Amino acid sequence: MAAKKANTGKKGQEPAETEICRDTYLTLASPAQGLYKEKGSKFLAFAYPVENEDQIKNHLEALHKEYFDARHHCYAYILGARQESYRANDDGEPSGTAGRPIHGQILSAGLTNVLVVVVRYFGGIKLGTSGLINAYKTATADALQQAEKTEKIVTKQFLTRFPYEQMNLAMRLVKELQLQVLRQEADMECRLWLSVRLSDVPRCQKRFEEERILLEEAE
């Protein structure tokens, strides 16, 4: 899915798709690195699987600390199962020559929940606009090619409440629908917190309704 163009250094936001059937996404299984050299300049690319902006901030801070003597720390990230949130940052490079090419490579790989940072050590010779775009693009592509990918399932959390005498019925539904129990409380009123695959939500809601057991979204 193509994202809107990101203004350099600014966040982008896209409307989420409405198809409930799209409940998987491709991301990185573990961090990876890439490298590109051109006319004395070195471009060190670092790719990370991330879940939120706090993790992104931590990775950026760690790289700034480790590579404090580098000229630029350019980056881009995409978050969300439908790639709905992203940012591209040139960190002082000419506008559109760093963050946008990095972002484009993440998109081309069909990935999300991914951060790529490219650290540049200047070699004394200017590369020009096309040279910079190619360098950041190639370094990012190298890191992403090295990375192991994994497909993840989008789930939604639900809470079901029922009297104790319906426990066996509720557990039969859990087994029938292959739901994951995240937490449970058994008392006069029992509670189960369940993880439901997004595409299975309508079917689960229907079955619980048929058996007259309350199923609601967990807060």
Image (cartoon, rainbow, N blue to C red):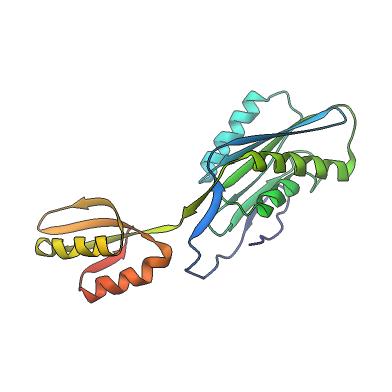
Q: Residue at x 60, y 31 (%)?
A: 61
Q: Position of residue 219 (x, y in %)?
A: 33, 57
Q: Which quarter of the picture shows residue 58? A: top right
Residue 200, compared with residue 126, is above or below; it is below
**On the image, which quarter does residue 134 sit in?**
top right
Q: Is residue 11 left or right of residue 178?
A: right
Please give left or right for residue 145 compared with residue 192 in the image.
Answer: right
Residue 152 shows in the view: yes
Q: Residue at x 26, y 64 (%)?
A: 176
Quick one: 141 or 55, which is closer to the camera?
141
Q: Nearer the viewer, residue 178 or 94?
A: 178
Residue 51 sits above or below residue 34 on the image: below
Q: With 119 as the anchor, is 80 left or right in this view? A: left
Kindly identify the residue that appears in the image at 83 percent across and 41 percent down. 132
Q: Is residue 94 visible?
A: no
Residue at the far bottom: name it: 210
Please provide percent x and percent y for residue 181.
28, 53
Q: Report the number of discs.
A: 0
Give the image location of residue 83, x and y in percent. 59, 57
Residue 33 in the image: above or below residue 53: above
Between residue 89 and residue 131, name the one nearer to us: 131
Figure check: 200 above or below 30 = below
Q: Position of residue 28 (x, y in %)?
A: 56, 44
Q: Nearer the viewer, residue 69 or 190?
A: 190
Could you tell me which residue is drawn at 62 percent across and 52 percent down? 86
Where is the N terminus found, in terms of image quarters?
bottom right
